[in-house]
Image: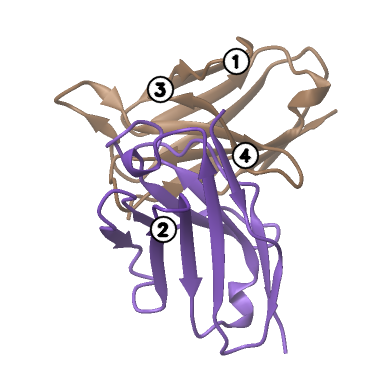
Chain colours: A purple, B brown
Amino acid sequence: QVQLVQSGPEVKKPGASVKVSCKASGYPFTRYGINWVRQAPGQGLEWMGWISADNDNTNYAPKFQGRVTMTTDTSTTTAYMELRSLRSDDTAIYYCARDPIAGMHLWLDPWGQGTLVTVSS
Amino acid sequence: DIVMTQSPDSLAVSLGERATINCKSSQSVLYRSNNKNYLAWFQQKPRQPPKLLIYWASTRESGVPDRFSGNGSGTDFTLTISSLQAEDVAVYFCQQYYTAFSLTFGGGTKVNIK
């Protein structure tokens, strides 16, 4: 079955960077884009951006442009999201979520289990 | 960005009763060329990722119980749970995908048992 398995929790100091991984299985990796969404404690969902697993084209939300980099490794069917210059308000659960249909960027399904990133001095 | 506004923020419903959640978009998410509303609904239980319930505003995802239904068009949408079960306690989010690379979500509605 289709599965997205993310890396474990991270604790970072302000100003540092974090790189979260998302290991995909159960489908042809390069045919579907991967999105990243975050959720601050007790808050709603915020879309951060998208990457094509076929050609590494990216689209980032303006809020994160310049501070985020999304990449993929087709040899390991893994997507990565790196966020730099971390601040306390970056403390959140970070999710990867796949496009639902090959080649089409619509709703998000399925989702990874989430990775808690805590930014604290 | 299209702003998605959900109401109420929370509601408490008796078991077996109907729960209705509203979602309003700041602009229409109806794509005229295919007459489809670019709106999805998700359920999120504590310590779990969101789970897709409905897409195209009213199409139920495979495996989702038929007590969940979505309606609406343009800017106003509803998610209805026709007969609330204990396992439906969760937060529910709407999401628009009309603007493909600027996805936005509603703030969420928490459903509890009265």
Provide the residue designation for mark 3: B72
**Foreground: disc 4 or disc 1:** 1
Q: Position of residue A12 (x, y in %)?
A: 67, 81
Q: Tell me the quadrant of the picture where the N terminus of chain B can be found.
A: bottom left
The type of residue carrying mark 1 is Gly
Q: What is the distance, in whole Å, between disc 4 and disc 3 at their CAs?
A: 17 Å
Q: Which residue is rendered at x = 73% and y = 39% of the image? A: B45
What residue is shown with label 1? B63
The residue under label 4 is B8
Mark 1 secondary-structure assignment: loop
List x then y, in percent, for residue B32.
17, 26
Q: How many marks?
A: 4
Q: Which mark is residue B26?
A: none
Tags 4 and 1 on a common chain: yes
Q: Are marks 4 and 2 in contact (CB under 8 Å)?
A: no
Both labels 3 and 2 in a single chain: no
Both marks 1 and 3 on one chain: yes
* Closer to the eye: label 1 or 2: 2
Which residue sits furthest left?
Answer: B33
Q: Residue at x 41, y 36 (%)?
A: A107
Q: Chain of mark 1?
A: B
Q: Picture coordinates of residue A41 (x, y %)?
A: 69, 62
Q: CA distance from mark 1 to mark 2?
A: 32 Å
Q: Nearer the viewer, residue A80 or A28?
A: A28
